Amino acid sequence: MKWKDWEPFYLRIAREMGYSIEKDREAARVLRALLLEGDEYILKDELASVVEKKAYVFGAGPSLEVALKEHDFSDGTLIAADGATSALLETGLVPDIIVTDLDGRVPDIKIANDRGAFLVVHAHGDNIDKLTAYLPLFSRILGTTQTEPLDVVYNFGGFTDGDRAAFLAEELGAREIVLVGFDFGEIVGRWSKPSLREHSPVWETKRKKFEFARELLEWLEKNGRARVEYLTLKREKELIRPTP
């Protein structure tokens, strides 16, 4: 997704969610400075070399746990959206790439990074303190922003960690994107936030994020080069699109 396509989405999201565009821009500048200072950043081409033609993108929905037990993901690149990293580690899988705004379980992200996972760290106005505190802990980092891209801080489109991971896979050359644990329902998976110890009823802010994520993924399906499929767990155990 190019900036010209993303900007209208972003302006609407910022308006409806009450985000400060200037704080988002400040976060992007902070992320850029930290990346250059630490010298652990990577560029798009290096990360693209990791992505196979098939990419599994793992969200933190309640169906994720069963999916990890019942399916084989060895034929593609594993891209975890933030908290989904913890679920993968619990089942013995290390994601190839983690897409995070550092809102998940940072110790698990650190474990996965130490075991070889690349990090795609996202800057927004509400996580400047986390960028400053946690970025020095990591290596092999690609930076992203939701405002105008900077030289070493990219914007491939996407809002939540999950749909942003799908846009990343598309940008880096995947031709088939399988979304795992993307439920968009009334229950939030226990991996979504460190404070959750079990699945939780969806709250209003999360519901709005789900709506934007679904809309963006529909855009990707229609406008991207990759085929996008949803792995949802029904009795048929088949790939189907979740019902609205």
Image: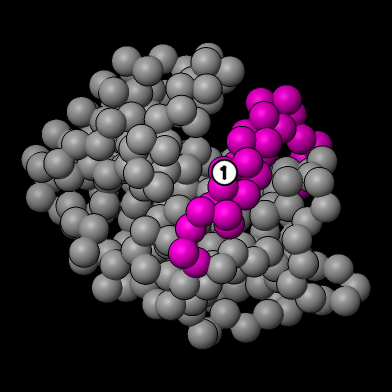
Check disc 1 and report the residue beneath it: 216
Task: Tell me where residue 9 appears, x and y as whole percent.
Answer: 49, 31
| 112 left or right of 216 in image | left
Residue at the image point whose x is 90% and y is 73% from the top = 235
Residue at the image point whose x is 81% and y is 46% from the top = 244
Residue 29 lies in quadrant: top left
| 119 left or right of 36 in image | right
Task: Tell me where residue 18 appears, x and y as whole percent.
Answer: 53, 14
Q: Would residue 176 be visible to someone looking at this image?
A: yes
Residue at the image point whose x is 28% and y is 31% from the top = 148
Q: Nearer the viewer, residue 171 or 135?
A: 171
Residue at the image point whose x is 41% and y is 15% from the top = 20
Describe the element under mark 1 as helix, strand or loop. Answer: helix
Residue 5 lies in quadrant: top left
Q: Main secondary structure of the magenta part?
A: helix
Q: Amino acid at mark 1?
A: Leu
The magenta stretch is 199-226
For residue 190: magenta?
no
* Mark 1 neighbour class, 10 Å CA radius: few under 14, some 14 to 19, many 20 or more: many
| 79 left or right of 114 in image | right
Task: Tell me where residue 91 appears, x and y as whole percent.
Answer: 60, 73
Q: Would residue 81 be visible to someone looking at this image?
A: no
Across the whole image, how many numbered discs are drawn on residues? 1
Vertical side of 167 occupied by 77: above or below: below
Vertical side of 173 occupied by 15: above or below: above
Task: Tell me where residue 156 appears, x and y as whole percent.
Answer: 36, 47
Colour scheme of the picture: one colour
For residue 213: magenta?
yes
